[in-house]
Image (tube, helix red, strand yellow):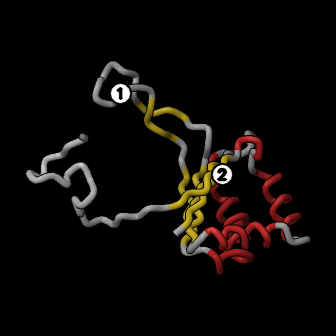
Amino acid sequence: MYKVLHFIKRKPHMTHEQFKEHFERSHAAMALKFCGHLFSEYRRNYVNVVYTGGDSRDENSGYGPREWEWDLISEWILPNEEALNEIYRIMQEPGIDELFWADEDRFIDRTATVTVPCDVRDVGTAFNPKGTVFDTPTGEPSWD
């Protein structure tokens, strides 16, 4: 499995809700139309508040809700890196590239976009101590 995270920020003239509505109605629809056959999953995680600023265990640390720079974490879950390369190829085709650029110019602050390709390791949800800090004779964790 291969994943690409896109951290995307709206332009200042839009509200978070307007950004979300436009992304779903236009940009996500275009992504699915042209590249949907390459996605295993396509998720959009809309964010307007994060919790940060200190140690959450210390009530005086300043930890709490903060505004965040990005409005969206978009996830492309792909079968492999070759699928990503094919998406990039499709996005460079004449007509398709101009369509995406024109749409992005309407509502995305491109200077703030961050793209993070990830090689995913999924261990599932069932606990298996083999090879972890719990793989000890007693089952107690050891970091040695």
Q: Is residue 98 above or below residue 20?
A: below
Q: Is residue 20 left or right of residue 143?
A: right
Residue 2: percent from left, percent from top: 55, 66
Crowding around mark 1 (Cα neighbors within 10 Å: few <14, some 14 to 19, many 20+) is: few
Local secondary structure at mark 1: loop
Q: Is residue 133 above or below residue 129?
A: above
Residue 86: percent from left, percent from top: 73, 73
* Residue corresponding to mark 1: 55
Q: Residue at x 76, y 47 (%)?
A: 110
* Residue corresponding to mark 2: 115
| Location of the C terminus (image quadrant) | top left
Crowding around mark 2 (Cα neighbors within 10 Å: few <14, some 14 to 19, many 20+) is: some
Residue 117: percent from left, percent from top: 61, 56
Seen from the viewer's position, the closer of residues 61 and 116 is 116
Q: Is residue 8 above or below residue 120?
A: above
Seen from the viewer's position, the closer of residues 60 and 131 is 131
Q: Does label 2 or label 1 sit earlier along the sequence? A: 1
Residue 120: percent from left, percent from top: 49, 61
Q: Residue at x 54, y 71 (%)?
A: 41
Q: Is residue 120 visible?
A: yes
**Cα distance in 3D space between marks 2 and 1:** 28 Å
Q: Residue at x 61, y 38 (%)?
A: 69
**Residues at circles 2 and 1 in contact by the CB criterion of under 8 Å:** no
Q: Amino acid at mark 1?
A: Asp
Quadrant of the rendered image containing residue 32: bottom right
Quadrant of the rendered image containing residue 83: bottom right
Q: Amino acid at mark 2?
A: Thr
